[in-house]
Every structure is written in structure tokens, then in C-alpha cells.
């Protein structure tokens, strides 16, 4: 079983920290589908240090989400350590994660995120400083390298271990690849073989079978699922079940999808407010509708919704349409 420091997970399935997505409403919904560990979206160290209101709101954790890993990012040791101390003492997170994988220019320009991948010595210096400053276990989420010419994944993971980090989540792509191309699982296996701390594999896990294959082929301690869980928390449930029993559970019905989508919406409204939540929920609703017949027309209409009532009416209307079509087909059949 996956264990990070003294935090033991119920299984090996981990929700990835996705920016703009992994707030408490989404995490709790995924947690209820069985994730062993959920990770919060990355939070700016300076935002914490300067008590930015939006940043401080991002630190909210519902007790039902635990165990939870809260991710911070930054490029300067002083502010990163100060932010980590605040998270350690003032939040109910179980694990403090340091982002070394974010590929977007506005983050790397600040010497944060994936920029760290070019300097194993900086990784050691920064991680050891954070480890020394906090009581919670410290982990790192990183990519395999900056580009094809600068892949220091093994050395970087060894530096995390040497610095006292308790686990590494490794995305098998370079910073230059962003989210394109194929994830390199061979590198993930090499890293797993080079350190004693737990390694969580990330990249191209789109089905429960992919998760099992990653565990079998790389020997990792856990599997991290990101984009495949968007609008599909059943991916988490089906993966957990498949790994535990070998059985592949059925995909959800349209009604099940919409019921969970509305639950997610209501949690987002409680977390933020109706106006912000409905706007944020537009992208999630489109993800929940992926693969549903007739969704294109509804997805366009979703972008015009400004209230909970409008959005729920639209979603339930689609369910009735689909169910009616299925009934008619059954009669004809």
C-alpha cells in the first residue's frame, strides 16, 4: 500500500494537482469515488506570505477529503520556506508538496515549477530547507526533464530523497512537451529503481487497465490520475476496483453523470458563490457531458448559463432527451 511518511493511503490511486480544477469541491467529489490521496491545486508561496485573499481561500480543506496533499510553488528559498511553515501550522493538510513540474511560462519565468528541473543542486537546497522547517511530510511533483537534452529525472529524484523528501510524483514528459506526445514510462521505472522513497507514476493513465500496466511495468508505488478524471470521477472508482478485484466496472449512465455534476456544482456554490461557481462549472459540465449523445448543442448553451437554475434545467433536459431516445430504441428493438 502507498505510504508517505507516516500517512498511509487506502489504495494506490492518487488524484493529480490540476491548476484551476482541484479546489475542495472537486477534490471531495473525487475522494468519495475512492481516491487514496487527493492533491490540491498549486498555491503561490508569495500569495501565502503576503496573505492574498484569493490564495488564502485556496488553502481550505474539508476534513472529508483527507488524506490530502497541498502543493506550493515558488522560486526563492525564503518565501517557499515561509509558505511551507504556514501550511504546516495553519492548515489541516497531511502532506506538503512542492511543484517542480508546472510548464507554463509565467511560472517558469519566476524560477519556479519546471525551471527547477535544470538544477539538481537547487532541488536539494530548496527541499532540504523546507523539510527542516516543517513537521508534515514533504514531497515533490516533477517532470522527467526540461527537454530531451536535459533529462535529470534520476539525479533530481535522488536529490529529493537526500534532502529528506518522502515521495516523488513523476510525470513522464518534459517541460517542452507540455501535455503532448507520449509519456515515457521507462524513465519512471529508472527513477523508481534509483531511490528508496515511494514513486508515484503520472502520464497517459487514461483507463483502469493503463493504471495496472503502469504499476506492473514501472514498479511504482502509486498511480496519479489527472485529466482522465475531469468530468469522470468514475475513472477513479473503476481504477480502484480494477486494481483490487480485477473486475472492470460499468461506465456510468447519463443520469448518474448529471446527478454528480449537479452535486459538484452545489459544492462549488457553497465554496465560492453562485455567480463564480456557475461560470467555473461551465468547463466541468462540458467534461461531464463528454461522450453523451447530443451534447454539442447543450455544451454551447452551457456557456450562456449564469445561474444554478439555468444550468440544472439544461442538464436535466438533456438527461430526459437521452432517456426518451433510449426508451424508444428499446421499444423498436
Image (tube, rainbow, N blue to C red):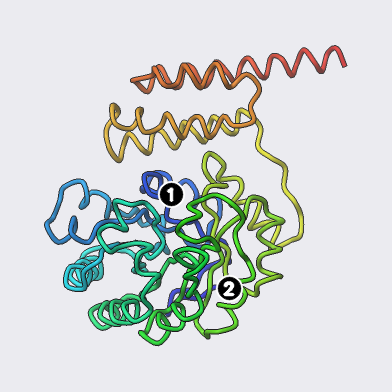
Q: In this view, does 203 lie to the left or right of 128?
A: right
Q: Which of 176 and 224 lies nearest the eye of the viewer?
A: 176
Category of crowding for the residue at label 2, using alpha-carbon neighbours closer than 10 angstroms: few (below 14), some (14–19), many (at least 20): many
Q: Percent x, y for residue 47?
A: 18, 55
Looking at the picture, does residue 290 appear above or below residue 94? above
Q: Which residue is drawn at 49% across and 56% down?
A: 15
Q: Is residue 245 left or right of residue 108?
A: right
Looking at the picture, does residue 305 appear above or below residue 257? above
Q: Percent x, y for residue 332?
A: 85, 12
Q: Which of 163 and 123 lies nearest the eye of the viewer?
A: 123
Q: Name the residue under label 2.
A: 221
Category of crowding for the residue at label 1, using alpha-carbon neighbours closer than 10 angstroms: few (below 14), some (14–19), many (at least 20): many
Q: Which residue is drawn at 53% across and 60% down?
A: 173
When asked about the image quadrant of residue 70, the answer is bottom left
Q: Which residue is drawn at 48% across and 30% down?
A: 285
Q: Which of 278 and 52 lies nearest the eye of the viewer?
A: 52
Indicate which disc, 2 or 1, sits on the residue closer to the N terminus: 1
Q: Percent x, y for residue 26?
A: 43, 45
Q: Percent x, y for residue 149?
A: 50, 68
Q: Which residue is drawn at 62% across and 74% down?
A: 189
Disc on res. 132: none
| Disc 2 and disc 1 in contact, CB within 8 angstroms | no
When asked about the image quadrant of residue 72, the answer is bottom left
Q: Which of 221 and 263 lies nearest the eye of the viewer?
A: 221
Q: Mark 1 points at which residue?
A: 28
Q: Residue furthest left?
A: 50
Check disc 1 and report its element: helix, strand or loop. Answer: helix
**Viewer-side label of 2, 1:** 2
Q: In this view, does 259 lie to the left or right of 22?
A: right
Check disc 2 and report its element: helix, strand or loop. Answer: loop
Please state, as top left, top right, bottom left or bottom right, where the N terminus lies in the image: bottom right
State the CA–CA distance, disc 2 to disc 1. 23 Å
Amino acid at each position: 500500500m502507498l505510504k508517505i511518511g507516516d500517512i498511509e493511503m487506502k489504495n494506490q490511486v492518487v488524484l493529480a494537482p490540476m491548476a484551476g480544477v482541484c479546489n475542495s469541491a472537486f477534490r471531495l467529489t473525487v475522494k468519495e469515488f475512492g481516491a487514496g490521496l487527493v492533491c490540491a491545486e498549486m498555491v503561490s508561496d508569495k500569495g501565502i506570505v503576503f496573505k492574498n485573499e484569493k490564495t488564502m481561500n485556496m488553502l481550505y480543506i474539508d476534513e472529508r477529503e483527507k488524506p490530502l496533499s497541498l502543493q506550493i510553488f515558488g522560486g526563492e528559498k525564503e518565501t517557499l520556506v515561509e509558505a511551507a511553515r504556514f501550511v504546516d501550522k495553519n492548515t489541516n493538510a497531511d502532506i506538503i508538496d512542492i511543484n517542480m513540474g508546472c510548464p507554463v511560462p509565467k511560472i517558469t519565468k519566476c524560477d519556479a515549477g519546471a525551471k527547477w528541473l535544470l538544477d539538481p543542486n537547487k532541488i536539494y537546497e530548496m527541499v532540504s530547507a523546507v523539510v527542516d522547517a516543517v513537521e508534515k511530510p514533504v514531497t515533490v511533483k516533477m517532470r522527467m526533464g526540461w527537454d530531451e537534452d536535459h533529462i535529470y529525472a534520476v539525479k533530481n529524484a535522488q536529490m529529493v530523497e537526500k534532502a529528506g523528501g518522502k515521495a516523488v510524483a513523476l510525470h513522464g514528459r518534459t517541460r517542452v512537451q507540455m501535455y503532448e506526445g507520449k509519456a515515457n514510462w521507462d524513465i519512471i521505472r529508472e527513477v523508481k529503481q534509483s531511490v528508496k522513497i515511494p514513486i508515484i507514476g503520472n502520464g497517459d493513465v487514461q483507463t483502469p487497465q493503463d493504471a495496472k500496466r503502469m504499476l506492473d511495468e514501472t514498479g511504482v508505488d502509486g498511480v496519479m490520475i489527472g485529466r482522465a478524471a475531469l468530468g469522470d470521477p468514475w475513472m477513479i472508482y473503476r481504477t480502484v476496483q480494477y486494481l483490487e478485484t480485477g473486475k472492470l466496472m460499468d461506465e456510468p449512465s447519463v443520469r448518474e453523470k448529471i446527478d454528480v455534476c449537479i452535486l459538484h456544482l452545489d459544492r462549488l456554490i457553497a465554496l465560492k458563490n453562485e455567480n463564480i461557481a456557475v461560470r467555473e462549472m461551465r468547463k466541468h459540465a462540458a467534461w461531464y457531458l463528454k461522450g453523451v449523445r447530443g451534447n454539442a448543442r447543450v455544451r454551447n448553451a452551457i456557456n450562456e448559463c449564469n445561474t444554478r437554475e439555468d444550468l440544472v434545467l439544461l442538464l436535466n433536459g438533456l438527461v430526459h432527451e437521452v432517456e426518451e431516445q433510449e426508451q424508444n430504441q428499446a421499444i423498436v428493438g
